[in-house]
Image (cartoon, helix red, strand yellow):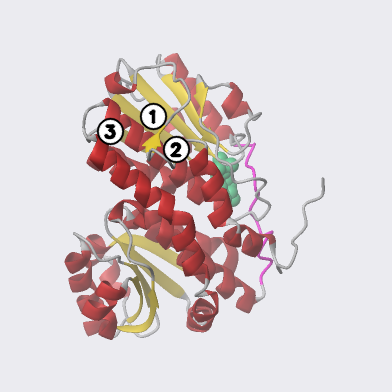
Amino acid sequence: AMIGKGQYRHFMQKEIFEQPAVIGDTLHSFLNPATLSVQLPNLPFDLSKVSRFTFIACGTAFYAGMVAKYWFEQVARQPVEIDIASEFRYREAPMPDDGVSVYISQSGETIDTLAALKYAQSQDQKILSVVNVPESAIARSSDAVMPTQAGPEIGVASTKAFTTQLTVLACLAIATARARGAIDVARERELSAALTEVPARIAEVLNHDEAIREISHDISEARDVLYLGRGTLYPIAMEGALKLKEISYIHAEGYAAGEMKHGPIALIDEAVPIIACAPSGPLFEKTASNLQEVHARGGKIVLLSDKEGLARAGELAVHTVELPKIDPFVAPILYSIPIQLLAYHTAVLKGTDVDQPRNLAKSVTVE
Ligand code: G6P
């Protein structure tokens, strides 16, 4: 059937607004809201005995894997390696006994990701894929599939596929943590409850659409934009920069906040907006002191944080967006929303072809 834009101006905008629903659908396929426990399909390997996970993907899907690396290490104490598919497929990396290799892809057809999968197969890895198209080549080549329930994604710049990938990977991290004895039942319930809350919290963030559109006026005039984050918000900073580049054609970089002083700080002046993804939590003070350094050099900060974070560092910013306070575990999912909206509105102001940006393809089936 033809998919329409409904009340929306672009597919990307529609897909951003669909996120509460599709994250809910994806969650319900892996998480029982009554018992707050994760229930995965039968996997052809023992989650308690995986020596190492290797996450491989391209583009936005790669950043989902990068968030997952933090989750698997912190929550499940599980060793993880991650790479982009175009590098991994030629690296000739040695792979461990009892390793599981995870392929993350919206289309399930990305040629580099598929080639990396074949390499891991040759190294006797079990193959698990997280795809949005269950009949895709990557899904068909896998030992097990955990599908995202995002529905068709038309906009070339990925939005709902990304947050549903994060949702699936969060469930897999919880199941791995439980299997490895890294968390108890109470902690599993806490993490599951935090995930269950995400759709409603995203709906709240979507109410800030107009405020974020206002901020995008400043962004649309910039030549360069820097995104900063720490921990699981570091991949979100990189995803924010990728979104902006893809659809507004403004040069942007995502950086680990603590690494800024090793290079990008040299770029900072009044003309470079700095988007900080900084929920309050264990790493907030560290990021706040990085923002202090930016502020001292005249950098114009857009601070995405919660009430507590804004009370502490809001005065450093020219614009703030207040997000709901949530468990730090799910912060990367929630903070994906304002960076998508910011890129979207900036692109609309610039008059670019939001759904079909120049030079990009939705599914990259040639090398
Ligand atoms: C293309 C798209 C990106 C996407 C990447 C990976 O470059 O423009 O939005 O993240 O491919 O696609 P996949 O279908 O494997 O997730």
Horizontal side, residue 114 vs residue 172: left or right:
right
Q: Which dot marks residue 177?
A: 3
Tell me how far mark 3 sits from mark 1, CA to CA: 29 Å
Residue type indicated by callout 2:
Asn
Q: Position of residue 46 (x, y in %)?
A: 34, 18
Q: Select label 2 or label 1 by which is in front.
A: 2
Horizontal side, residue 132 vs residue 339: left or right:
right
Tell me how far mark 3 sits from mark 2, CA to CA: 17 Å
Can you say whether 26 is above or below 223 in the image?
Answer: above
On the question of residue 159 being in view, the answer is no
Helix, strand or loop at label 2? It is: strand
Quarter holding the N terminus is top right
Q: Check residue 56 for magenta coloring.
A: no
Tell me how far mark 2 sits from mark 1, CA to CA: 40 Å
Looking at the rendering, the stretch of residues picked out in magenta corresponds to 352-367
**What residue is drawn where x is 63% and y is 61%?**
12
Residue type indicated by callout 1:
Arg
Q: Select label 3 or label 1 by which is in front.
A: 3
Give the residue pinned by disc 2.
32
Residues at discs 3 and 2 in contact (Cβ within 8 Å): no
Residues at discs 2 and 1 in contact (Cβ within 8 Å): no
Q: Earlier in the sequence, mark 3 or mark 2?
A: 2
**What residue is drawn where x is 20% and y is 77%?**
293
Give the residue pinned by disc 1.
91
